Image (spheres, rainbow, N blue to C red):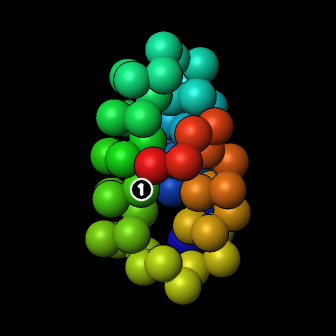
Amino acid sequence: MESSAYNKYLAAVKAANDCEERRAKELLRQIQADMVAKYGLGDRDVEYLIRQFRYHI
């Protein structure tokens, strides 16, 4: 994953983590789906960003 995409996803994860729980989970699902579709679950950056999720989805 290129650094610009990584930074975009990291900012989105942090913003989602700051939302109310139901909204946060919805946003995190969308973020995860987008990352996995573009980079796959085997990407180390994707794995790290998913670990930054406040909630398990």
Do we see residue 2 in this rendering? no
* Position in image of residue 56 (x %, y %): 54, 48
**Quadrant of the rendered structure where residue 45 is?**
bottom right
* Position in image of residue 17 (x %, y %): 58, 28
Determine whether 56 is above or below 43 in the image.
above
Q: Amino acid under label 1?
A: Gln
Q: Name the residue under label 1.
A: 32
Q: Which of 21 and 27 is in front in this view?
A: 21
* Position in image of residue 41 (x %, y %): 48, 78
Determine whether 41 is above or below 57 in the image.
below
Q: What residue occupies the far bottom of the structure in this picture?
A: 42
Label 1 sits on a secondary structure element that is helix
Q: What residue occupies the far top of the structure in this picture?
A: 20
Residue 52 as seen in the image, left or right of residue 21: right
Q: Residue at x 59, y 57 (%)?
A: 50
Residue 25 as seen in the image, left or right of residue 47: left
Q: Which residue is drawn at 42% across and 35% down?
A: 25
Q: Residue at x 42, y 79 (%)?
A: 40
